[in-house]
Amino acid sequence: MSLSAALSAAVSPSPSPSDTSTPAVPSLQDAQESATNAASWVEQNWSTWLAIGLRVLLILVIAAVLRFVVRRSITKLIDRMNRTVQAVDGTALGGLLVNVERRRQRSQAIGSVLRSVASFIIMGTAALMILGTFEINLAPLLASAGVAGVAIGFGARNLVTDFLSGVFMILEDQYGVGDTVDAGVASGEVIEVGLRVTKLRGDNGEIWYVRNGEVKRIGNLSQGWATAAVDVTVRADEDLDKVKATLDDVAERMSKDEPWNELLWGPIEVLGLDNVLLDSMVVRVSAKTMPGKALTVERELRWRVKRAFDAAQIPIVGGPAVLTDATADTDPTAGMAAPSAYANTSSPQAQAATPIAPPSVTK
């Protein structure tokens, strides 16, 4: 050791115990050892990480390809359904049973639900497989998801019921946009069909929001055909042959006139006597019409029947006649009560009914 080094070592103070807490600056040799350890760790585990990365990449690629194929298949299926509907459109059967806009919206709703379900199942399975690749224990996660699903199911059971009911209503084609339905809780024309709520337009213009889970029965008045029925009440002594001939003439003329011949699905039939009373008879006239046109045909048929009966001098009975006797003199006091003797306070009856006053007490 040189003299200067010895002097500097002698002059420099020795480290105190309090200075031992100060972190020492890593030397170049420590950095080299750390880098060597990291390199050796990477060299030992790079194959494992590479295998995990390739496995994750393979899972993502397979999930993406499978999702694309499934969604494309669903789209092609929906397009085929739309082409079938368009092929039927314009025919007599299409005019009676098929509503292109309704079927289009129904197919779109079904396609949207199927695509969403397929994407959820495929991507959810891929996510679980990726977590399993990293050797993450999925048992607590699946158990937590199960408990959360049960809790959500109990808490939102009405929402789940509405959603499932809406899915089955759309799949079974119970009703669609433009149909006139009776849902029990409300009735009217369907203006929108959703997975949770169905919107109905009432007769007075109001909009009803009906939850699909609350619908227990559906009466669709727009599928197939409707029935227009008119009851004509005549006197009991009327000539039935004359009545039937008049109604047949009205039915024949209306079946040939436009646009009623397009609204009728069959000839107007005189069914005969529906009811016989002491002073009247009821003759029923019926016809099959296009869906939703029964009320319009009934109004027109009543109009024509009334005009034809007036021309044939056949009176229509609207109800029991009120018998009045114009020559009978009415007594204006018939509804008044008889005079009472108790109304006069000076009459013996009124005095006898007067309560007796108690005797006065004198001291």
Image (tube, rainbow, N blue to C red):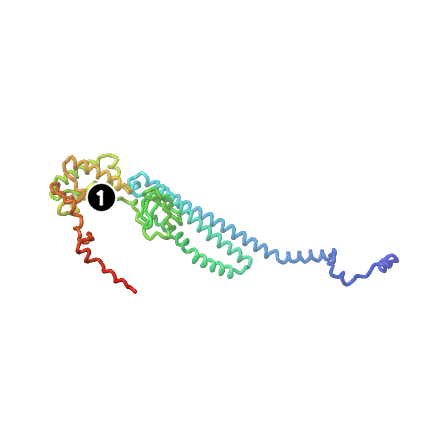
Looking at the rendered structure, the kind of residue marked 1 is Ala
Q: Is residue 41 above or below residue 234?
A: below
Residue 268 placement, left or right of 237? right
Q: Residue at x 35, y 45 (%)?
A: 200
Local crowd size for mark 1, using a 10 Å CA cut-off: few (<14), some (14–19), many (≥20):
many
In terms of depth relative to the viewer, which is nearer, 71 or 355? 355
Q: Secondary structure at mark 1?
A: strand
Q: x, y percentage for residue 201?
A: 35, 43
Q: Residue at x 24, y 60 (%)?
A: 357
Q: Is residue 154 above or below residue 270?
A: below
Quadrant of the rendering where the C terminus is positioned:
bottom left
Q: x, y percentage for residue 286?
A: 21, 43
- The extreme bottom residue here reads 363
Quadrant of the rendering where the N terminus is positioned:
bottom right
Q: x, y percentage for residue 120?
A: 46, 52
Q: Is residue 342 above or below residue 85?
A: below
- The extreme right residue here reads 3
In terms of depth relative to the viewer, which is nearer, 232 or 278? 278
In terms of image quadrants, where is residue 299?
top left
For mark 1, what is the residue?
Answer: 229
